[in-house]
Amino acid sequence: MPYQAPLKDMLFVMNELADLAAVNALPGNEDATPDTAEAVLEENAKFVANVVAPLNHASDKEPSYLADGKVTTSKGFKEAFTAYAEAGWQGVQHPVEFGGQGLPKLLATPCIEMLNAGSISFALCSLLSDGAIEALLTAGSDAQKATYLEKLVSGQWTGTMNLTEPQAGSDLAAVRTRAVPQEDGTYKIFGTKIFITYGEHDFTENIVHLVLARTPDAPAGVKGISLFIVPKFLVNADGTLGARNDAHCVSLEHKLGIKASPTAVLQFGDNGGAIGTLVGEENRGLEYMFIMMNAARFGVGMQGIGLAERAYQKAVTFAKDRVQSRDLAGSAGPVAIIHHPDVRRLLMNMRSQTEAARALAYVGAGLSDIAHNHADAEVRKSTLAVYEYLVPIIKGWSTEMSQDVTRDGVQVHGGMGFIEETGAAQHYRDAKILTIYEGTTAIQANDLVGRKTVRDGGAVAKNLIAQVRATAAELAAREGADFKAIEAQLSAASADLEAVVDFVVANVKSDIKSVFAGSVLYLKLAGLVLGGWQMARAALIAQQKLDAAEGDTAFYSAKIVTARFFADHILSQASSLRSAIVAGSSGVLALDVEQF
Ligand SMILES: Cc1cc2nc3c(=O)[nH]c(=O)nc-3n(C[C@H](O)[C@H](O)[C@H](O)COP(=O)(O)OP(=O)(O)OC[C@H]3O[C@@H](n4cnc5c(N)ncnc54)[C@H](O)[C@@H]3O)c2cc1C
């Protein structure tokens, strides 16, 4: 089934929930009008549907491979990347100064969703380049910006992120790669990095590796890590390519999913040392890498949403086509399985969670634009705090959601989902990595509890909960069973979330393990409530449009039904999450390690 971008929903969410008008009013965003947004999304949708999406299934069967030190990517990928770069898509959200289009994150976000719906394996390359660009924009010297940014923004070169080593995964304090200062101001890099996405490929003539390493006298732990640029080919003063650097791909991983994306083991410095230049100051590398990771974490959340949408579309097509069993209400013969209530439940699970996660992520993107571009420093600061609270939720919840949705997609297909022919199984396999890389869900939850909730005593969380309550009050004022049902679930779930925030803040000092025993559940609860809040807002706006007889009535009435389903079936899970969280650690930690 060909992928068709859900442009109607994307534009509704951008305009009505994420307030594109407010983003358009920010200094520097004058071009981001609703008309431009629509035109950009339509073009991107065409590109993805025609060029990227058709490659996805075949590339799973013919992954990238390494031979004689060279990586050949799956058939069609190189040409698609060239077309992507030439059309300017890599530069959508990057500064005009470096050749980008300078459009806001709110407009780039649906483009990222579409590209990932097309093919996660393909989209990863540009996602990593986006992160490298962000890091260099923030911490790079003028000379580094001049050398690398235009080439990265245009897609002439690509970027990678080199954190992981065999002994250093979630715990980057354990990074051992060495950086030895040279007399000319450069550094020689020695070490092994594993699991490096697009660490080697055939898309472009050069690859810009951003590498975490330690200088000789660096303090132990995360405070002694620095960030370096280590290009595959050194760059001459005039911008042309120089000597091959001592950074080589020694193997590619065989994986459960995203098989077409080359995941490389990179060896630095086996032949005398790979030449790198320091980004920013020594020992501040992790701080800079976090800039890159925050951008990338948001992007991985979007991968989950794009993938969920694709799996949903495939399941709907199959459910309309596959004929099996009579209708419960009686029918002359067997009917398409979409008529069976449980198949409908699965499809509504898929649809409602995808829409809720999309709405929350786009709202987050709009907040990021305000946090970076608003004229008032106080507004920037307070909005940044809200955006940063949302990042681990958008990453963690949307990716966990994509696993549920792609699993339901397989279930809708029955046996045809389990075999590889339909592609439903590929989506399920591809989804699994999303809860692991860029920080596992547990690492997102640690961030949510530690930096985002405890540090301000739960202030940002409580502020959001107050906004959820305000929406619940609006629902209570509306007539109709759907609004009453949504209000009841949203009010109860927001009380659950508030109780959990109180529990986290009150117990983190006296019983820290109790709090972290439920941290992933807290992340999921926050996702449910905030996603449910966006669905409730969507339902209210949809009703206003229906009352005013404006626009597409089928779309708006479906939105209300979908919001009602989300409230009844998904938001209602909040109370069980709360009970598990406040039960604390007794059940989780009481067994001795020897008892396992
Ligand atoms: C396909 C693929 C692509 C990747 N791409 C890149 C890339 O481009 N660049 C890069 O640098 N890395 C990359 N990675 C590495 C990825 O980011 C790590 O695998 C990930 O961060 C987890 O680290 P780990 O595998 O060492 O697992 P571990 O850290 O060993 O974790 C194992 C388990 O322990 C849990 N755990 C660990 N510490 C904690 C804690 N403090 N609290 C609670 N639970 C904890 C984890 O949640 C997990 O469940 C990639 C990995 C894969 C598989």
Image: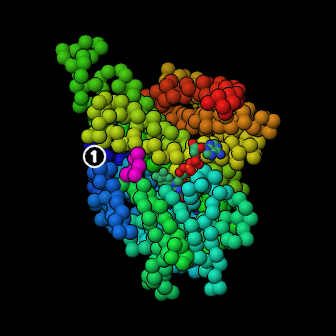
Quarter assignment of residue 489 = top right
The residue lying toward the viewer, choosing from 264 and 404, is 264
98 drawn magenta: no
Image quarter hosting the N terminus: top left
| Percent x, y of residue 445 | 63, 42
Q: Which residue is mark 1?
A: 2
| Residue 215 visible somewhere in the drawing | yes
Q: Which residues are magenta?
A: 254-259
Q: Residue at x 52, y 79 (%)?
A: 147
**Three-letter amino acid code of the residue under disc 1:** Pro
The residue lying toward the viewer, choosing from 106 and 296, is 296
Task: Determine whether 266 is above or below 503 in the image.
Answer: below
Badge 1 residue CB within 8 Å of ligand 1: no
| Percent x, y of residue 115 | 39, 54
Q: Residue furthest top?
A: 330
Quarter assignment of residue 309 = top left
Quarter assignment of residue 473 = top right
* Element type at mark 1: loop
Dominant secondary structure of the magenta stretch? loop
| Percent x, y of residue 534 | 54, 38
Q: Residues within 10 Å of mark 1 (few under 14, many from 20)?
A: few
Relative side of 59 to 569, left or right: left
Q: Residue at x 60, y 55 (%)?
A: 168
Task: Determine whether 307 is above or below 132 in the image.
Answer: above
Task: Determine whether 310 is above or below 413 in the image.
Answer: below
Q: Residue at x 54, y 28 (%)?
A: 571
